[in-house]
Image (cartoon, rainbow, N blue to C red):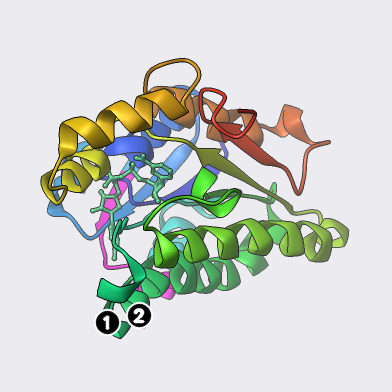
Amino acid sequence: MDLVAVVTGAARGIGREVVVRLRAGGYRVVAADVSPGVADLAEAGWVVPVVADVTAGDAPAAVIGRAVDEFGRLDLLVNNAGRFLRRPILDTGDDDFDLLFGINVRSAFRFTRAALPHLIAGHGCIVNTASISGLVGVTNQSVYAMTKGAIVQLTRQLAIECAPLGVRVNAVAPGAVDTGFMDEARAADPDPAASLAVTLGNHPIGRMSTPAEVARAIVFLAAPESAGITGTILSVDGGYVAR
Ligand code: NAD
């Protein structure tokens, strides 16, 4: 039996690596992203790209429905789409709050709700992409950190609520990962070299993680062999939180 997955934020970075690894592991995948770049993941019968803004009202039904229409079932939802914001609170507007909560939190909630009936019928599993910013205090990330704290609690809450339904819910909590996400943070940073030095200093392994390292953790949590794991927040942070 081939397992079927939906991955959001799949065009690049961690999400793209998750799609590639799931496909290599024999999953059939619907890869959703607001970026048209997701199209180049297409592989007939195996990977179906869907261009969708996860915050759009009809996106959860459209993306989840596409998986069920195309492959007849759904076993795994990876809520990975996310936006970052590093900004002092006094410069952070209500629009920033609404934008980040819309993408990072509300969409994960809505995709989960749309997927759950299918996951209950299938080999039910959800993996959310949280962050170390949802676990420990960080600098100038009030809104982003709140969104990831919400994802951590959504994960724990649903692990308990969904266990009787046969659905496992886990999250990864990456530290800094070298993706386009970091490129954008650097571009908005008045002193990117100094910030990079601080970032690397905060990660005991002395480097950022790679998207492949985070994707590997997501695929591990998703695997049927991980049936005993639910409610876990698996850090992939080079020792950041341990420090
Ligand atoms: P990335 O920017 O490379 O990829 C994020 C993807 O999400 C992009 O393809 C983007 O187009 C997509 N996306 C953004 N808004 C969307 C929307 N409204 N609808 C659909 N797709 C949307 O970043 P990444 O590092 O791969 O981030 C993936 C996840 O990892 C995010 O949830 C992020 O918060 C989390 N994370 C990243 C880091 C890091 O340092 N890179 C650290 C901790 C957590």
The amino acid on which the numbered mark 2 sits, given as a three-letter code, is Asp
Q: Answer whether residue 175 is magenta in the image.
A: no
- Vertical order, 33 against 224 (above or below): below
> Which residue in the protein does label 1 denote?
95
- Vertical order, 222 against 66 (above or below): above
Q: Nearer the viewer, residue 170 or 243?
A: 243
Residue 10 has which mark?
none
Residue 98 has which mark?
2
Q: How dense is the environment of label 1, judged by Cα within 10 Å: few (below 14), some, or many (20 and up)?
A: few
Can residue 74 be seen in the rendering of this structure?
Answer: no
Give the quarter of the figure containing the N terminus: top right
Distance from Cα at disc 2 to Cα at disc 1? 5 Å
Give SS at disc 1: helix
- Vertical order, 118 against 225 (above or below): below
The amino acid on which the numbered mark 1 sits, given as a three-letter code, is Asp
Tell me which corner region of the image, top left, top right, bottom left or bottom right, holds residue 91.
Answer: bottom left
Q: Residue at x 36, y 57 (%)?
A: 140
Q: Answer whether residue 49 is magenta in the image.
A: yes
Is 22 positioned to the left or the right of 171 in the image?
left
